[in-house]
Amino acid sequence: NKNAEKLLNIRVAQTLGKHFSDVLPPDHQDTVREMIREIQRLGRETLARQVTVPIGGQALTLLVSLTLLRDEERQDMGVVAVFEDLTHVIKAQRALAWREVARRMAHEIKNPLTPIQLAAPRLRRKWATGAPDLSTILPEATASIEHEVGALKRLVDEFSRFARLPGIGPKTAQRLTYHLLRAP
């Protein structure tokens, strides 16, 4: 169909009746062969896998469903492949996840800032008035500030580790069908 042509950058008129290995690039052929082997190994007629493939200079995340076609005598006739483009869905999920991370980070940063914000002016007032209890309050307030700054540092360190992990608005996935005939 037209959506499959556009998605896979393949012209149907040039592919009808051909083996998939004559149509698909080598890296895509390996994915199809692996899925067909798995269908046969499991004794199933259908298999679906999420794959990321380079097409047209970009990486697309596709849900690929293969279904074996058989005649009345159960002889293999070919394969029907259904592609669902999940690329935009995955990007939307990532964006939502990062939005939630940012919201939680803002909340977690505000928590230690409040004691720091209260301790600093208290120290300044005590210092300015020459308060007799300054020698008691100074160690308390500085310990509180040091503790909260340490909490902020740990939070930033954890966030940095999280940001190094490998890796999502939503868009309806396109459902595409492409017939691959004469599968091995």
Image (cartoon, rainbow, N blue to C red):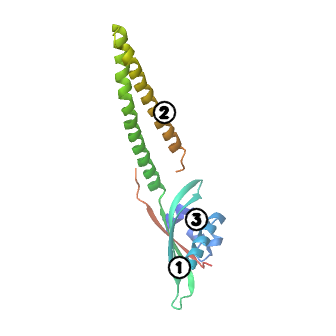
Contact check, label 1 and label 3, Cβ < 8 Å: no
Q: What kind of residue is marked 1?
A: Leu
Identify whether 13 is placed above or below 171. below
Labels 2 and 1: the sequence-earlier one: 1
Q: CA distance from mark 2 to mark 3?
A: 52 Å
Task: For residue 172, say whether it is visible.
Answer: yes
Camera-nearest label, 1 or 3: 1
Q: Residues within 10 Å of mark 3 (few under 14, many from 20)?
A: some
The tag earlier along the polypeptide, 1 or 3, is 3
The answer to which quarter of the image holds residue 27 is bottom right
- Please state, as top left, top right, bottom left or bottom right, where the C terminus lies in the image: bottom right
Q: Residue at x 61, y 65 (%)?
A: 28
Q: Secondary structure at mark 3?
A: loop
Closer to the chain start, of discs 2 and 3, is: 3
**Which amino acid lies under the numbered mark 3 shown in the image of this protein?**
Ile
Q: Give the structural element (helix, strand or loop) at label 1.
A: strand
The reply to whether the C-beta atoms of the residues labelled 2 and 3 are less than 8 Å apart is no
As rendered, which of 85 and 1 lies closer to the eye? 85
Q: 10 Å neighbourhood of mark 2: few (<14), some, or many (≥20)?
A: few
**Residue at image mark 2:** 153
Residue at mark 1 to residue at mark 3: CA–CA distance: 21 Å
Tag 2 near tag 1, CB within 8 Å:
no
The correct choice, above or below, for 93 with respect to 11 in the image is above
Q: Residue at image x 45%, y 50%?
A: 94
On the image, the x and y values in percent for residue 114 come to 35, 28
What distance separates the C-alpha of mark 2 from that of mark 1?
56 Å
Residue under label 1, please give it.
Answer: 68
* Foreground: disc 2 or disc 3: 2
The residue where tag 3 is placed is 10
- Picture residue at 52% right of the left edge, 61% below the top: 7
Amino acid tagged 2: Lys
